[in-house]
């Protein structure tokens, strides 16, 4: 197989930045497109950075591509409301899933979360679960859903709850089952790229436990 193209959504985030770095360094890709709200200030011969309005993406400029990595995500605090949170964590990823189908991308890989369920009483898990169900109904060539637990890594923004949680997770990690154990963002990114390049047809869930075992 010749070299391929990748579209990385959420390239400024914790996992997305790691995915972007891996794709740029991979011999499998000759072009990596990163749609962003603000410039990343990264210079690389393979990188096509595009500052876009996610409410009205320039689809024909972004597609077609072989692989889509969706690492979009926010918090309700940062989004300002449940409605805005749903837009970033559900509507945007689903719109790009639809575009991936239209332009016949071979793989759509996305990060959701451990505990995602459409009927969950927890709003965050409910939105992630609804997204998974809706992506499954698109019947893409290959959909890979990565479900990490608490993420470890250095964010640009400070999140007090995550900082405390990650500190506790590091102390108790050895007694926490792999299904729930906190996971490094780079481990998730490596799992995403490796599984994407394997390209199994169909809809697949990759659990926190599986990602830990791949590390």
Image (cartoon, rainbow, N blue to C red):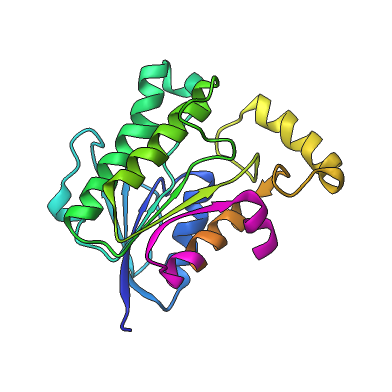
Residue 128 magenta-drawn?
A: no
Image height of 86 relative to 206, above or below:
above
**Tally of marks:** 0
Q: Please provide percent x and percent y for residue 194.
A: 51, 68
Instruction: Quarter of the image for the C terminus: give it.
Output: bottom right
Q: Position of residue 102 (x, y in %)?
A: 17, 54
Residue at x-position 16% and y-position 54%: 61
- The residues colored magenta run 195-215
Q: Is residue 160 left or right of residue 44?
A: right
The one of 86 and 122 positioned closer to us in this rendering: 122
Of 61 and 209, nearer the camera is 209
Residue at point 33%, 39% (across, down): 134
Camera-side residue of 100 and 32: 100
Q: Is residue 123 left or right of residue 163?
A: left
Q: Is residue 178 above or below residue 199?
A: above
Quarter of the view holding residue 1: bottom left
Direction from residue 184 to residue 87 in the image, left or right? left
Q: Residue at x 22, y 54 (%)?
A: 101
């Amino acid at each position: 197989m010749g070299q391929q193209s990748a579209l990385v959504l959420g390239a400024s985030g914790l996992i997305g930045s790691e995915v972007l770095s891996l794709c740029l360094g991979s011999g499998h890709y000759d072009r990596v497109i990163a749609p962003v709200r603000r410039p990343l200030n990264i210079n690389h011969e393979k990188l096509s950075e595009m500052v876009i309005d996610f409410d009205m993406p320039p689809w024909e400029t972004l597609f077609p591509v072989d692989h889509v990595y969706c690492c979009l995500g926010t918090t309700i605090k940062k989004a300002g409301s449940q409605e805005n949170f749903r837009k970033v964590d559900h509507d945007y990823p689903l719109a790009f899933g639809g575009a991936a189908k239209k332009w016949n991308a071979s793989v759509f890989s996305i990060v959701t979360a451990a505990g995602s369920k459409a009927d969950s009483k927890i709003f965050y898990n409910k939105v992630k679960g609804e997204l998974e169900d809706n992506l499954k109904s698109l019947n893409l060539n290959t959909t890979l859903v990565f479900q990490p637990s608490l993420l470890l890594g250095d964010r640009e923004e400070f999140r007090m709850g995550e900082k405390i949680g990650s500190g506790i997770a590091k102390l108790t990690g050895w007694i926490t089952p792999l299904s729930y154990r906190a996971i490094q963002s780079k481990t998730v990114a490596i799992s995403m790229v490796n599984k994407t390049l394997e390209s199994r047809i169909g809809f697949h869930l990759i659990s926190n436990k599986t990602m830990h075992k791949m590390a």
